[in-house]
């Protein structure tokens, strides 16, 4: 397929936010182009637990979720580094599916819906000129009336645009490393566990085909202290937690090496840059222990598309589109992010997490209240 000179919508980044935005655009009859720098299907660092709040929206986009018999996750186990743990029901719950599968399936739906999808194509810059967004890629350039920046946690564009969070010195919210494996180990299909260790936490839950996603977040500092060697870190630190010791010693690891990502930042971000609507992690990243980043990406794309659609139909001007999207974003996600950052501060120190878990164990309703603050309702 040839890249055309002009589109109604250009989408930069084909994760959940970008694919959902592009599909909505195509379903509404717009000419849409999407650029993804990787080639589908591909693995991505993510815990792969999706809150049920997204079920209806994903089905509306065309995913046959009910036919896939995915693990339904309704229970949470949290363990402290010393192995003490609490178990309780999740208020809304979720389901497990790999990003390899869901992103690929959405990319196929996007293509069928008419999206001009270019994978293996990196966007180098976007510039706003004469009421249009000029998009420069390594394979050519185009322009669009609306551009959606759905390029995730950290991208070349963040640095190019000198976004504030890229210029903040390393601190407690911006120097994280994520590591993910797919493993096989007998594990209850209805449970997600969050196992804490000194300097981070590791989630495990079931995905498709009787596999489990095993994914952890730690700081660059803790990795450095273990000679920048992931396996040393796992042996010396993660396996101090008895649950993780069992998992890491007994599981069958399905890839040779894990998928990793570094320089993750939970600092505040803007929702508009260069007149591009930023959605998903590009607009603000919730700490993974809340298990709600994918919901924010998907729901955010719905909120952004409502405004983009009004703009493209001539019902509002560009200023109103940007202002109303920012307000909607803040209304739905502002509090979730603040709560996520506060909770994040309590995890990481072994002593603090051991104490915190012992303190909240008798108060399951308090834990449910915290979970509800970091989650939304079906939309
Ligand atoms: C350790 C960890 C565990 C997590 N666990 C969970 C969980 O269990 N549940 C949950 O809901 N959330 C979880 N999250 C959060 C979740 O992964 C993200 O919030 C979600 O992936 C955001 O989707 P997105 O579409 O914004 O970004 P992404 O899915 O990251 O997609 C962005 C895409 O943009 C592409 N891209 C970047 N730059 C360019 C460019 N210049 N040109 C073209 N393409 C580009 C990238 O290749 C990528 O495919 C976790 C995050 C981490 C770090």
Image: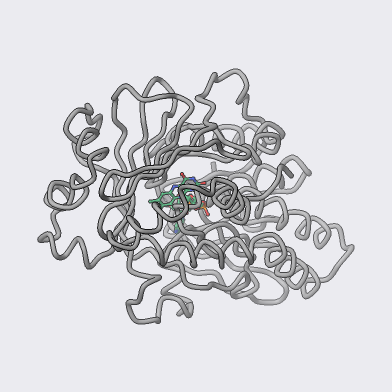
Q: Quadrant of residue 153?
A: bottom left
101 and 284: which is toward the camera: 284
Residue at figure coordinates x 62%, y 51% from the top left? 372
177 and 129: which is toward the camera: 177
Residue 121 visible in this rendered orientation of the protein:
yes
130 and 25: which is toward the camera: 25
From the image, which quarter does the N terminus lie in? top right
Query: On screen, 173 above or below 70?
Result: below
Q: Position of residue 283 (x, y in %)?
A: 56, 65
Would residue 322 be found to the left or right of residue 190 on screen? right
Would residue 223 be found to the left or right of residue 182 on screen? left
Q: Position of residue 9 (x, y in %)?
A: 67, 56
Would residue 88 be found to the left or right of residue 120 on screen? right
Q: Position of residue 211 (x, y in %)?
A: 36, 25
Q: Position of residue 308 (x, y in %)?
A: 75, 59
Residue 155 visible in this rendered orientation of the protein:
no
Total numbered badges shown on the rendered structure:
0
Residue at figure coordinates x 40%, y 52% from the top left? 357
Would residue 74 be found to the left or right of residue 178 on screen? right
Residue at figure coordinates x 36%, y 35% from the top left? 213
Q: Residue lying at the far right in this picture: please name it.
A: 315
From the image, which quarter does the C terminus lie in? top right
Query: On screen, 211 above or below 16?
Result: above
Question: Is the image coloured rainbow, by chain, by secondary structure, or in one colour?
Answer: one colour
Query: On screen, 209 above or below 168?
Result: above
Residue at figure coordinates x 56%, y 38% from the top left? 90
């Amino acid at each position: 397929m040839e890249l055309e000179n002009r589109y109604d919508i250009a989408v930069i980044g084909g994760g959940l936010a970008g694919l959902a935005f592009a599909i909505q655009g195509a379903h509404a009859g717009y000419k849409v182009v999407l650029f993804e720098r990787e080639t589908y299907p591909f693995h991505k660092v993510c815990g792969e637990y999706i809150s049920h709040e997204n079920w209806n929206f994903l089905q509306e986009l065309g995913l046959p979720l009910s036919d896939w018999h995915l693990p339904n996750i309704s229970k949470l186990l949290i363990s402290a580094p010393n192995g003490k743990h609490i178990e309780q029901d999740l208020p809304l719950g979720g389901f497990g599916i790999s990003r390899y599968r869901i992103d690929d399936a959405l990319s196929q739906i996007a293509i069928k819906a008419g999206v001009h999808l270019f994978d293996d194509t990196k966007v180098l810059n976007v510039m706003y000129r004469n009421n249009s967004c000029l998009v420069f890629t390594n394979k050519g350039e185009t322009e669009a009336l609306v551009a959606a920046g759905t390029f995730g946690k950290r991208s070349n564009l963040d640095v190019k645009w000198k976004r504030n969070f890229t210029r903040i010195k390393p601190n407690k919210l911006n120097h994280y490393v994520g590591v993910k494996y797919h493993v096989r180990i007998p594990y209850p299909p209805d449970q997600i566990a969050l196992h804490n260790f000194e300097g981070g936490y590791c989630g495990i839950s079931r995905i498709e085909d009787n596999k489990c996603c095993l994914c952890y977040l730690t700081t660059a500092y803790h990795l450095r202290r273990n000679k920048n060697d992931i396996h040393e870190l796992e042996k010396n630190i993660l396996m101090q937690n008895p649950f993780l010791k069992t998992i890491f010693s007994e599981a069958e690891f399905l890839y040779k090496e894990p998928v990793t990502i570094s320089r993750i930042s939970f600092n505040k971000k803007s929702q508009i840059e260069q007149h591009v609507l930023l959605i998903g992690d590009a607009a603000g990243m919730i700490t993974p222990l809340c298990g709600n980043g994918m919901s924010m990406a998907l729901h955010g794309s719905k909120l952004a598309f409502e405004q983009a659609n009004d703009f493209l139909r001539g019902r509002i001007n560009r200023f109103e589109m940007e202002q109303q999207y920012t307000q909607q974003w803040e209304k739905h996600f502002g509090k979730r992010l603040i709560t996520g950052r506060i909770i994040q501060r309590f995890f990481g120190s072994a002593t603090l997490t051991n104490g915190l878990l012992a303190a909240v164990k008798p108060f399951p309703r308090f834990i449910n209240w915290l979970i509800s603050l970091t989650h939304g309702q079906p939309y």
